[in-house]
Amino acid sequence: MDRVKEISKFLVIPRDIVILSHRNPDGDAIGSSTALKLFLEKSGHTARIIFPSDFPDIYSFLPKTDDIIIYDFEKEKVEKIIDKTEVIFFLDFSGLDRIDKIGEFVLSSNALKIHIDHHIDPEPIADHVLWDTKASSTSELVFDFINLLNGAKDIDEEVAIALMTGIITDTGSFKYSTTSKTFLTASKLMEYNIDLNALQNKIYNSLTEKQLRLIGHALDNRMEIIPEYHAGLIYLTKQDYKDFDIQRGDTEGLVNYLLMIKNVKIAALITEQPTIIKISLRSKGDISVQEIARKNFNGGGHKNAAGGHVYAKLESVLKRFKSILPSLY
Amino acid sequence: MDRVKEISKFLVIPRDIVILSHRNPDGDAIGSSTALKLFLEKSGHTARIIFPSDFPDIYSFLPKTDDIIIYDFEKEKVEKIIDKTEVIFFLDFSGLDRIDKIGEFVLSSNALKIHIDHHIDPEPIADHVLWDTKASSTSELVFDFINLLNGAKDIDEEVAIALMTGIITDTGSFKYSTTSKTFLTASKLMEYNIDLNALQNKIYNSLTEKQLRLIGHALDNRMEIIPEYHAGLIYLTKQDYKDFDIQRGDTEGLVNYLLMIKNVKIAALITEQPTIIKISLRSKGDISVQEIARKNFNGGGHKNAAGGHVYAKLESVLKRFKSILPSLY
C-alpha cells in the first residue's frame, strides 16, 4: 500500500465513508465490506455499504447486513450519498463496469478513493491501492489494511467472523487460492474466538430441502459423463425450473459436482432460461474454459471458471458443447 | 511430551522402528504414518508401517504407501517384525482394541513405545505420550513431535503433503475440529511448496462416475426429510447394492449430505447388508448421536458422529429411527 501514513492522517478526524462492492455480491464482497464498516465505525467514522444489486440471503447472519444499501432499490439515495461522501472504498472488483451505473457518479466524485482487491488487471480508478492477485480474497487484504493502519486492536469477534467468511467462501473452505499467508491470516482470526464449526454450518449447510433434492435430480437424471474426453455435463430444462421452483442461486455450485469425478477435467452446467441458454463451465488444471466461453458462448471469466449464454435451443447447445471436446486433447 | 531428550538420545543411533495405526485406516492414519516414516528414514532409521486392515485406494498417491504392511494379508510377517523391533509408534488410536490381534504381540514386546494421538480417553499403553484432544489430527501432532525433536530441517514437500493430507481429511478441509494452531500448522506446511489445489483434488475430487450417480440416486429416490424433528434419513436396499455394485467405501460421506439442509440437525444413513442393517448417524450441535447409537443400535462413536447395527428388517429399523426423534426435542 502506498502512502499508508497519508491515509492514516486523513482518517484522524471522523469521516463520511462509502464502501462499494460489485454486482451480485458474494461472500467475499459482503464479508470484506461488513468487516471494514465495523472497523471504521469503531474508529468513529460513518460508513455505508453500497452494492449495485441484492445479496444472497444466506449471508444475512453477518453483522450490519441490514444497513446495506442496494442501488437497484434506492437509486436516488445512493446518488446523494456518493455526492457528499469524503472517502470511497472499492472492494473486491477490478474495474468500474462491475458496479454498473454507480461507476458514473463515482467518476465525478471528489472523494478520496481507496481500492482493495485481488482480481487480475486492476483499472487505475483510485488514489490509493492495496492489490495482490496472490491473495485468497479481498477479506485477506482488508485484514492486512487494518493492520497497516495499526488497527488490530479494533478487530473483534464480529470483524473476524466477517473476514473469515470472505476467506472461506472465496477459497471453497481452503481448497484453492490458498497460500501460507492465507492460513496464517486464518490462524490470527481464530484468536478472536470464532466458532468455526457454527460459521461453516451457516455458509455450507444452509440449503433448503428443495435445493438438495434438485442436486439429487440433476445427478440422477440430468448428468452425462463423456469419459473419452474427461468431460461431464448437467442440463436443466424449463420444466425442471417449474418442477423444482428454481430461483436465482438455487443452481449455485451444481456444476462443481461434476469435478468430483476423478477423471473429469471439464464440466458444464447448461440451463434453459426463458429466452436464452446459460452455460457455466469449470475445469481442472490446464484447460482454459475462459477461452471456450469467449469463443463459443459469448462469455468469459477465469481460466478454470467461466460462463456465457446463447440464443439457441437446449439440444443444440448440448451438441455444441460436446463438439468442442475433441479439440481440447 | 514427556522426556523428549530421552527419545532423542534413543534415536541417536539407527533403530528398527514400527509405526502402527488403526483398523480401517483413514487419511489421518495414513498421512501421519507415512510422514513419520519419511522423517525417520531421513534420520537413518528403518521404519515400517503396519495397519490391521487395508486402506482406501485414494490415498495411494501418498509416498511409501506401497511399503505398508497389512496384517490381514501378512500375519506371520507382522508377528516377526513386531517381535524384533526396537521402537513402536502408536498413531491415531486411543486403545489396543483398535488394532485387533496385533495388540497381543505388542503387549509382549519390549520395544520402546511412543503414543501420539488426539482421540479421547487414551489407554496407558506407551512409555512416552504426546496427546492433545484439541488437536485437529494426529498429523498435526506428528508435526509437533518432529519439531520437538528439532527435526524441522528434515521436513520436505513429501512429508508436508502427508501431514497436510491428515489435517485436511480429519477436519473436512478446515470445516470442524480446527483451531488457530491448526491453521498455523497448515501455514507452516505450505512453506514446503505444497500444490494445495492438486492435493485437494486428489482427496475430494476422486470419485468414480458410479459413486457420484449413487449420490444422485440416494438424494433423488432414497431420501426422507422429517422437518418437524429436524431430521433426515437416506436408506439403501440390497437391490441398490446390486444395481450400483456398491463396494466398501462407496457410501462414505453420503450421510453428510443430509446435514447440508439448514434445518436438519440429525441425520441417518441406513443400509441393508447381507445379514444386518447398518446405521450411520450424524448431528449438528447438541444432539448426541453417540448416545442414540449406544441405546438403540448396539453401537457408539462420538457426540456428532456415531454408528451401529441391528439384526432386523430394513423397514423396522427405519421405523425405530423415526420413533426416537420425538424424545430428542
Image: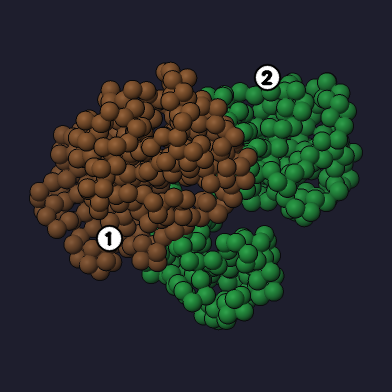
Chain colours: A brown, B green
Q: Could you tell me if residue A14 is visible in this image? A: yes
Q: Nearer the viewer, residue B29 or A131?
A: A131
Q: Amino acid at mark 2?
A: Lys
Q: Which mark is residue B82?
A: none
Q: Dot 2: within a 10 Å radius of its alpha carbon, few (fewer than 14), some, or many (20 or more) residues?
A: few
The image position of residue B162, as x and y in percent, is 60, 34
Q: Quadrant of residue A291?
A: top left
Q: Secondary structure at mark 1?
A: loop
Q: Residue furthest front?
A: A13
At label 1, which amino acid type do we have? Gln
Residue A92 is at least partly visible in this image: no
Determine whether the residue tagged by mark 2 lies in a helix, strand or loop.
helix
Q: Is residue B320 left or right of residue A125?
A: right
Tell me: A20 left or right of A151. Answer: left
A191 or B48, which is in the foreground? A191
Q: Position of residue A239 (x, y in %)?
A: 20, 65
Residue that numbered label 2 is attached to: B153
Which of the two marks, 1 or 2, is nearer to us in this view? 1
Q: Which disc is residue A247 wearing? A: 1
Image quarter where the C terminus of chain A lies is: top left
Q: Quadrant of residue A306?
A: top left
In the image, taking residue A233 as reference, residue A319 lies left or right, namely: left
Name the residue at 54% across, 66% down.
B265
Q: Residues within 10 Å of mark 1 (few under 14, many from 20)?
A: few
- Taking depth in this image into account, of A203 and A240 the one nearest to the observer is A203
Alpha carbon distance from label 1 to label 2: 54 Å
Which chain does the numbered disc 1 sit on?
Answer: A
Q: Residue at x 27, y 28 (%)?
A: A110
